[in-house]
Image (cartoon, rainbow, N blue to C red):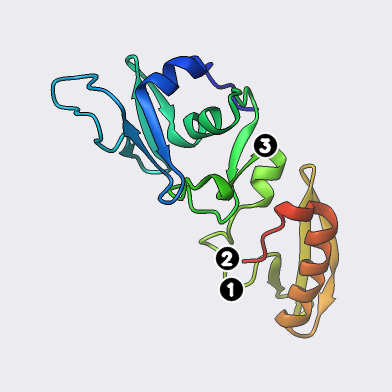
Amino acid sequence: MPKFKPLPSFERVQELLSYDSETGNLYWKQSVTRWIKPGDKAGSRSRHAVDVTVDKKSYRAHRIIWLLKTASDPGDNLIDHIDGNPFNNKFANLRLATHRQNQCNQRRRSDNTSGLKGVHWNKERRKWVAQISKNGKIIPLGRYATKEEAHAAYCQAVYKFNGEFARLE
């Protein structure tokens, strides 16, 4: 489980930053360095998210936004991006999640050869296999003549096991 450093106080963040709900962007309210002016967009895009530096410490923008909108630090909970886009920080796209729930909301792996999440080809039996992972264990969902049938079985199971965090693609 990830451990997150505590966020700055709600008051400090309110003093320094404003949030635009329409764009999902943070903006500086005051000049914190010579090159940052009030009204400038806060944060820089990293490989997996937008990072914002407050008082010489870097934080994920979505965690700062959660603090601004709810007045509470999410603690060790993750902030999940519902649409899977880590750069879409509109509050309607953010929700608290456990590590397992966040994993359920991942996209299809890039090395997937069937093109469908939860489905692979079994050479020996010459069938499409559907399976799902639950609590670190692989649960077989059956073998099917077509990959579409296998994917349908996966889709049914993913909603049963993952609920609102289910992602089909």
Q: Amino acid type of disc 2? A: Asn
* Separation (CA) of disc 1 from disc 2: 6 Å
Between residues 113 and 109, which one lies in front from this camera angle? 109
Name the residue that disc number 2 marks.
Answer: 112
Between residues 37 and 135, which one lies in front from this camera angle? 37
* Separation (CA) of disc 3 from disc 2: 22 Å
Q: Amino acid type of disc 3? A: His
Image quadrant containing the N terminus: top right
Q: Position of residue 147 (x, y in %)?
A: 71, 80
| Residues under numbered marks 1 and 2 in contact, where contact means CB atoms less than 8 Å apart | yes
> Which residue appears at 32% of the width and 15% of the height?
56
> Which residue appears at 19% of the width and 29% of the height?
37
Name the residue that disc number 3 marks.
Answer: 99
Q: Position of residue 109 (x, y in %)?
A: 56, 59
For marks 1 and 3 on the same chain, the one whose residue lies earlier in the sequence: 3
For marks 3 and 2 on the same chain, the one whose residue lies earlier in the sequence: 3
Q: Is residue 52 left or right of residue 66?
A: left
Is 91 drawn above or below residue 28 in the view shown?
below
Q: Position of residue 96 (x, y in %)?
A: 66, 37
Image quadrant containing the C terminus: bottom right
Name the residue that disc number 1 marks.
Answer: 115
> Which residue appears at 44% of the width and 23% of the height?
14
Is 30 drawn above or below residue 102 in the view shown?
above
